Image (cartoon, rainbow, N blue to C red):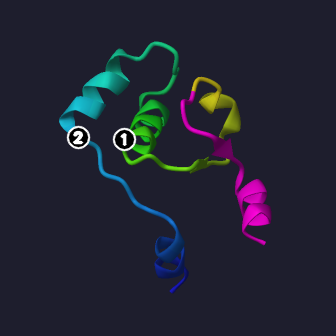
Amino acid sequence: MWLKDICRILTVAGASHEQVLEAIDNIQFKDFEDCLQDECARMVNADCLVTCNLKDFKAAKTKVYSPDEFVKLLE
């Protein structure tokens, strides 16, 4: 299954209570869920985030790639 293949190269991170609170308080992001993704990525020292929604991640502390950009990096 392709989801298992993706999970072999990517890490799925969970959110802690502290990360949720930090995301709620972060006013640099317009969207709570986007901020929470960045907080989780930061806490696991992720190399990057992959999203189709690049414009909403301008305040991200983590490097952000579109799916196409990420696939090119893997090639």
Query: What's drawn in magenta, residue-wise?
Result: 60-75
> In the displayed image of the protein, which residue is found farthest to the bottom?
1
| Rendering coords of residue 55 (x, y %) | 69, 31
Question: Which element is circle 2 on?
Answer: loop
How many numbered marks are there? 2
User: Residue at the location (58% across, 48% down)?
Assistant: 48
| Rendering coords of residue 34 (x, y %) | 49, 35
Check disc 2 and report the residue beneath it.
Answer: 16
Q: Between 75 and 24, which is closer to the camera in this rendering?
A: 75
Question: Which element is circle 1 on?
Answer: helix
| Rendering coords of residue 64 (x, y %) | 64, 42
- Circles 2 and 1: CB atoms closer than 8 Å: yes
User: Residue at the location (44% across, 46% down)?
Assistant: 45
Q: Nearer the viewer, mark 2 or mark 1?
A: 1
Q: Amino acid at mark 1?
A: Met
User: Residue at the location (22% across, 30% down)?
Assistant: 18
- Name which quarter of the figure residue 69 lies in: bottom right
